[in-house]
Amino acid sequence: MVILNIEHPDIEEFIYCKAREEKKAHALQELGFDMGINGKDSISIQYQNANNSVRVNDDFMHAVETTKIGIW
């Protein structure tokens, strides 16, 4: 498991890294690369087996609670 604190300067990159790699995998598959689970070209895709988590603090959670747009 990889955990990064919400205030870390690279948090946005950390949050989106898996989605970006997934898009890359789909693009490569459309071009004919072998991207199956045991595909010879799938080794170029990173983060797919990682369990990434973000540690939030009380200030962040308070901001979520008081923001009208919220995430729920």
Image: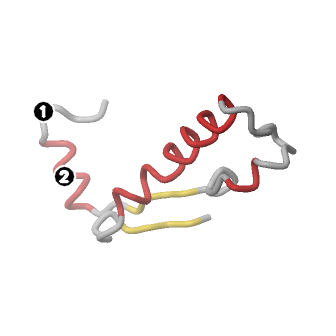
Looking at the image, is 47 positioned above or below residue 29?
below
Q: Position of residue 18 (x, y in %)?
A: 54, 49
Which is nearer the eye, 18 or 26?
Answer: 26
Of 16 and 52, which appears nearest the observer? 16
Which comes before the other along the chain, label 2 or label 1? Answer: 2
Q: Residue furthest front?
A: 31
Task: Give residue 68's mark.
Answer: 1
Q: Nearer the viewer, residue 16 or 59?
A: 16
Dot 1 amino acid type: Lys
Identify which residue is drawn at 35% across, 67% down: 10
Of marks 2 and 1, the one in the foreground:
1
Q: Which element is circle 1 on?
A: loop
Specify the label residue 62 is tagged with: 2
Residue type, mark 2 in image: His
- Residue 70: % across, % down: 22, 35
Q: Position of residue 64 (x, y in %)?
A: 21, 45
Q: 53 above or below 4?
A: above
Relative to residue 3, is residue 29 drawn left or right? Answer: right
